[in-house]
Amino acid sequence: MSEESKLALLGGMKAVPREDESLFHWPIVTREDEEAVLDVLRRGTMSGTDITKRFEAEYAEWMGLPYALATCNGTAALTAAFWACGVGAGDEVICPSMTYWASAAPALPLGATVNFADIDRETLCIDPSDIESRIGEKTRAIVLVHYAGHPCDMDRILPIARKHGVAVIEDVSHAQGSLYRGKACGTMGDISAMSFMAGKSFALGEGGLIATRERRLYERCVAFGHYERTGAPTRFNPADNQISDPSLQKFSGIALGAVKHRMNQTVSAMGRVQLKQYPARITEIQKALNRFWDCLHDVPGIRPHRIDPSSGSTMGGWYYPHGLYRAEELGGLSCDRFCEAVRAEGVASCFPGANKPLHLHPYFHEADIFRQGRPTSLAFGQRDVRQGRGSLPVSEKIDELCFTVPWFKRDDEAAIRGYAEAFRKVATSCRNLEG
């Protein structure tokens, strides 16, 4: 066996001798970004809304929606979306278990509970076949997470929601710019929410946003966390009333959620600049990741987590890219051992699994948020929809079913082929590894 083909984990040469940081640097910050932020700082309008409103209008136009509302972070956006859709005491929300906690946790402080659904092992998104049986009289919303940029199966899910009169909240935190059959993710449900934190594909350091076609839902989000837009004069906005609903107008001046969701304008200023470049930048990312997976099309045991581009769908900025793992094709080699061997080849970003399943977390079983002497998930007459180990098998086996891959920001053919070779080398030499 040559030194080139011998696994690095067993003393051979690395497939990627040295990682090229320029392939992964993100976000791309230009002089225009810096000047936009400095302008806000110099004017002292960090807590204003003039720049933020321009950002909202531009983002809404890009999505093809009439309303967008920026928030201080993605969790705030999701909380406002829950409340806007009527989620309250005694209600239920359906959400995939394998996601970040903010996709589900806001239900409990609103007095609701979460009925977790399993995920599809190919898409890593909510399994459409595991939704309808979970809908009950108190189900108010279904949260769809376009996980790692992969669009959910909207053609199967939306008819179920419409049949039962249940709101659809799209969590687009991973999928800004993703398309489902030509339609932008975040535009097909009733309302969408997303995060702009550092590390996301649309990365502004922090911040979030809700977007919707419905004026009613938009106004409810304003009323929930944007007191300065409900008619209360401020030195930044002396006449800033965005509420027309009389049932909300009477609470003018105080946020109904008793929270301040306003986005810092240094963030929205950067957002306006980033948005102009974002379509071209994610096109580059898509070329790079598709190239990577095309290089591995014939390798056993690993599959791309991507959507068929001929369907009119895309992976957007391909945030948190993954591969799908099939141990049975590699002699039973564990995903953990596979990833260890790939890292030894010089690929630092290869790890097994994804987000841990939420249905097993004590928060959703035991947390007594309102100090009522019982779990909040049961405190307001909800059905007991808590689930233990073994109830959602795909989510619970996520560490065996997928792994992370490099998130390329630049399409460099030679470099990407080198990274792909590391995965090929391990997959084709796995007989030399144990379990």
Image: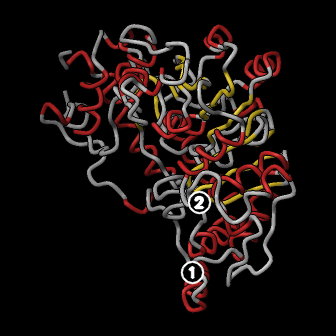
The label number, if any, that marks residue 261 in the structure image: 2
| Residue that protrudes farthest toward the bottom in the picture | 42
Amino acid type, mark 2: His
Q: Residue at x 59, y 66 (%)?
A: 263
Q: Nearer the viewer, residue 385 or 75?
A: 385
Identify the image quadrant of the N terminus.
top left
Q: Is residue 62 left or right of residue 269?
A: right
Q: Nearer the viewer, residue 354 or 228?
A: 228
Residue 356: x and y, percent?
Answer: 38, 29
- Secondary structure beneath disc 2? loop
Identify the image quadrant of the C terminus.
top left
User: How many neighbours does mark 2 have within 10 angstroms: few (below 14), some (14-19), or many (20 or more)?
Assistant: many
The label number, if any, that marks residue 429 in the structure image: none
* Disc number lying in front (1 or 2): 2
Q: Residue at x 68, y 11 (%)?
A: 132
Question: Mark 1 to mark 2: distance in Å?
Answer: 20 Å
Q: Which residue is mark 1?
A: 37
Amino acid type, mark 1: Val
Q: Is residue 433 left or right of residue 391?
A: left
Mark found first going from the N terminus, 1 or 2: 1
